[in-house]
Image (cartoon, rainbow, N blue to C red):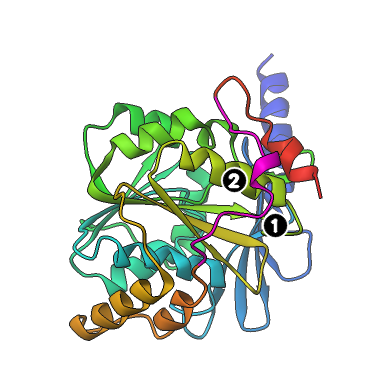
Amino acid sequence: MKNVILQLACAVAVVSCLATAPVHAGTIFEVTTVYHHIRVVDQGTERILFFDDAQQTRMSLQNPAAGHFEYTEFFHMPWLWNHRLTNVLMIGLGGGSVQRAFERFYPEVVIETVEIDPVVLRVARDFFNFKESSRQRVYIDDGRVFLRRTTSTYGLIVVDAYVSSRYGPAIPAHLATKQFFALAAARLGTNGVLAYNVVGSLQGHQRNLVGSIYKTMKTVFPEVYMFPATTSMNVVMIGTKSTEKTTAAQLKQRAEAFVRTRTQVPPWFMKRVGAFRPDPPPNLASCPVLTDDFAPVEGLARTR
């Protein structure tokens, strides 16, 4: 019996090793978890984190502070609605590029991150220069469950979370509903801001998903604005608790004043302000509001 147990243990060990052994060119780490098939790939001077076949994080091997995706730079725009914020909650870690940037450019800010997959945290630590500290805290939990349990309030909540589906990366449905946005709003302070990444575009790929997320956020937040990326299919939406409307001219003035008062700002900050879109998506009328009872995010993502 002991020999049988030993043989089984050895077999399990071999299978585990095979499951994590790199099989793609340039891959330095690969593993399948309950949530993702994770790969870390070195391509030239860049290191890339993949969840399934989708790139999640990109980092320059020569300068770990550089090489990130354009859309992540829009997560800095909430400071133009709440320039005194000191605490940030992020749902989704990836390689931690946004967290590291916040830590670098806003020394007064404490960042808390909720990540559901513990392996993602290990990968961020081991391969993407992510370090936990008194200002950089990580909780292994579901984002919505964490929001429901916490008694903390935040100046900014950033949602950049995706799961695997048969059609590719998908927004977790329970993080895309009216009830979720209401819970997030309840955890924001008076001038709090929600930043939400949607994979899609305003008039092409996954436009119906973009429209539904916007329409659903608008049922909770008085004002919702968009920042579409030009180098990837991403739209970052900004929901504010303030009822005051913001124009492009006003946002530019705020940005100029913000830059003058800071000792350092990201070099691309003013350029990203120019992507501001105050108007709703053009297809809004045909997009449903998402609720806990009806949230067909995968179906919306498939429509063209």
Mark found first going from the N terminus, 2 or 1: 1
**28, 181: nearer the viewer:** 181
Q: Is residue 5 left or right of residue 188?
A: right
The quadrant of the picture occupied by the N terminus is top right
Vertically, is 204 above or below 68? above
Q: Amino acid at mark 1?
A: Ala
* Residue range of the region highlighted in magenta in the rendering: 277-291
Vertically, is 276 above or below 7? below
* 290 inside magenta stretch: yes
| Residue found at x 22% / y 61% | 109
- By secondary structure, the bulk of the magenta-drawn segment is best described as loop
- Graded by Cα atoms within 10 Å as few (under 14), some (14 to 19) or many (20 or more), the crowding at tag 2 reads many
**65, 24: nearer the viewer:** 65
Residue 52 image point, x, y percent = 71, 51
Vertically, is 190 above or below 3? below
* Local SS, label 1: strand
Q: Amino acid at mark 2?
A: Tyr
Q: Give the quarter of the image for residue 49.
A: bottom right
Residue tagged 1: 54
Give the label on residue 162, or none.
2
* Residue 254 appears in the picture as rendered: yes
* Residue 142 appears in the picture as rendered: no
Residue 85 image point, x, y percent = 22, 59
Q: Is residue 36 left or right of residue 182?
A: right
Q: Give the quarter of the image for residue 44.
A: bottom right
Asked whether the beta carbons under mark 2 and mark 1 sit within 8 Å of each other, the answer is: yes
Residue 209 image point, x, y percent = 67, 45
